[in-house]
Image (spheres, rainbow, N blue to C red):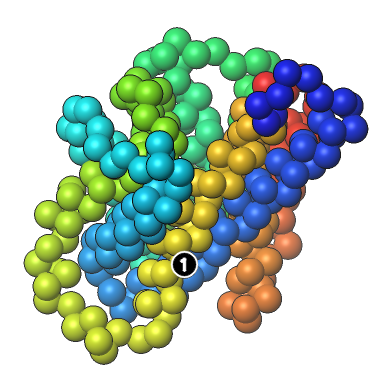
Amino acid sequence: MPDAVSVSPVTARTEALKGHAAMLLFATLISGSFSLGHLATPHVDPGALTALRFLLASAVMAAVILAGRKGDRRLGVQAPWRFLILGLLLGSYFVLMFEALRLSDPVSLAAVFTMTPLMTALFGLVLLRQTISPLVGASLLVAASGALWVIFRGDVDALLAFDVGTGELIFLAGCACHALYIPLITILNRGESGKLFTLWTVLGGLVVVGAYALPEVVATDWPSMPAIVWVTLVYVAVFASAGTFFLMRYGALRLPAAKVMAYGYLIPSIVILLEGISGHGWVAPPVLLGVAATVLALMMLVVNRDAA
């Protein structure tokens, strides 16, 4: 909730609704990166695309900070090595995501993404000794079950044989990096503002991924890239990076943490809508059972007043 000593029930309800609207937009923007990334990755190396993404996102975040109030224009930080670690994890997530989108469809990978909260909870337990409530634990298991059903495309035989696609396995490793990144934010934070911390994390990713992908960045004939590559680059750097950061922060000030996290469960459903509306086909009806489970997990947390 915004910084106020006390608020009326009506004001609190209004602010909560604003938080839910922000997180719904957050989930939609994240979903768009799966669909656009799937269209762009056949044309460009994932590492090169991620390096340029970090470059553009760094410029956007630096501009936001420099355009702020005078007291918020400081760009320096202590112990910048911290951000190389965070940048390595975040960069690995994005590179593996784009690599996986070459091999698998956006819907399956969006379902894999819903496993991230469960892995985050496990890393939080190990690194921070954080525990979760029975409600949150139940929602995580329901979402994970639904995700597995979508990943195996509603095929019981494939599920029993654990026939997982290469793309899904690659992205699962990427999601593990993302899940580890989240508790490390708490461990490595030294009091920087959210904007400054994000800027340096993106810069850390730029250094790490840039060093890894430099040969591809130099070798790529950027002027001849199709428009979808540039559209995807701008989208993931501005909307799916800087934009979602602000929305996440906005929602976190107005909603309990569990409800903020729950909106990630909605991503497979939105990706299915985006893929269907854009003419890339609709999923088979049995797969919708898994999608329904992830939506149920969302509702378990959003509707419950005690979720925290």
Determine which quarter of the picture holds residue 288: bottom right
Q: Position of residue 259 (x, y in %)?
A: 68, 33
Q: Is residue 214 above or below residue 69?
A: below
* Along the viewing direction, whichever of 66 and 136 lies nearer the viewer: 66
Q: Farthest residue in the front direction?
A: 70
Residue 152 visible in this rendered orientation of the protein: no
The quarter in which the C terminus is drawn is top right
Q: Position of residue 269 (x, y in %)?
A: 67, 56
Q: Position of residue 202 (x, y in %)?
A: 31, 48
Q: Is residue 69 above or below residue 223?
A: above
At x 17%, y 69%, the residue is: 217
At x 37%, y 16%, the residue is: 127
Residue 91 visible in this rendered orientation of the protein: yes
Q: Position of residue 83 (x, y in %)?
A: 25, 36
Q: Farthest residue in the bottom direction?
A: 224
Q: Is residue 105 above or below residue 184?
A: below
* Along the viewing direction, whichever of 91 and 125 lies nearer the viewer: 91
- In the image, 213: left or right of 34? left
Question: Which residue is under mark 1?
Answer: 235
At x 54%, y 46%, the residue is: 246
